[in-house]
Amino acid sequence: MYTTTKHGFEGEIRVDREWEEMVIPSKYYLFHSYETENEVNHSHQMDTIFLCQNFILLLEIKNIGGRVDFYQKKHQFIRTRLDGTREAFSNPIDQIERHVRFFKRVFRSWNLILPIEYAIVLAQPTTIIGDAPQQVSIFHVSGLQTHVYQLFSKYQHKQIPEHQMDCAKTKLLEMRKPKKWSPTIDQNKLRNGALCKACQYTSVMQYKHGHFVCPVCNTKTKKALYEALHDYRNLHDEWISNGEFRNYLKIESRYAANRLIADLNLEYKGFRKDRKYKIPSNILTYLEKRT
């Protein structure tokens, strides 16, 4: 799962570079990694949406090497590796055409008349495009600029008022419902504590006389505390008790932990032994100003 997600993200980055180089002839909006839900609460995830007064363009980005074949009648998408092994994936044509049908329904509810275009973009330049239906735009990332300019030429005499486009942009933002990533993490495999940045976060620092000291390279710093709490918030919980604070940072003294927590001036709830402190989401930037 991680590899697939990582490769997909890298592919989207390559496509983003093409957008940066384009000279767009009119006002436009770009939505990256757009997620929303349809009428029955089923998810729609789109890699890129390009909105302008002439048309809206939906892009499905694939960062897959080897040879790819699109079998439209069978609704199959197959990748053949260099060693000859074959793999079947979800058909991106079916995926993006499902998004198009959804947007047609949405636009009708908005009384918005705007052409909907779509394309499948291959992010790796070495990917060989084999069998593919002619009625679907499938091309390498290097062809994105040409494709966009051709669409502007195609719809040069069809243009909605700018205020309608801005209204559509606002509604798209209101519709956006990104899903929270909920990874399954084995807590026993996590390295606790303030990790030494100088050692590429491989060694756990020790708390001594108001500083965190690395037993390997002898780096001494207070900022490791902020990074450790940032990690704790993302990996465990946004609330932390004194005992959890001491256990996570390997601080033996309850009073030393109390002094550190008091200096952080965190929001808290509960009383005495039940008290917990809230680690702010922006703790790195929020606390850097205090050092």
Image: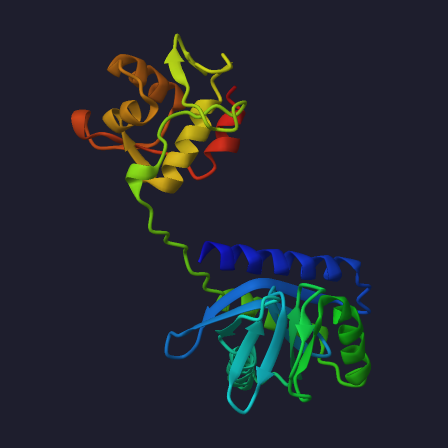
In this view, the residue farthest toward the front is: 83
Query: Where 6 falls versus 167 (above or below)?
Result: above
Left/right of residue 161 with respect to residue 224 in the rendered view:
right
Q: Position of residue 49 (x, y in %)?
A: 62, 69
Residue drawn at (80%, 73%) of the image:
146
In this view, the residue farthest toward the top is: 209
Judging depth in this view, the residue of 71 and 274 nearest the camera is 71
Q: Specify the color scheme.
A: rainbow
Residue drawn at (45%, 64%) of the image:
177
Give the total of numbered labels: 0
Left/right of residue 19 with respect to residue 251 in the rendered view:
right
Residue drawn at (41%, 19%) of the image:
205
Q: Quadrant of the N terminus?
A: bottom left
Viewer can see residue 164: no
Q: Position of residue 258 (x, y in %)?
A: 29, 18
Splitting the image into 4 quarters, where does residue 31 fall? bottom right
Q: Position of residue 207 (x, y in %)?
A: 38, 14
In this view, the residue farthest toward the bottom is: 73
Q: Position of residue 120 (x, y in %)?
A: 64, 75
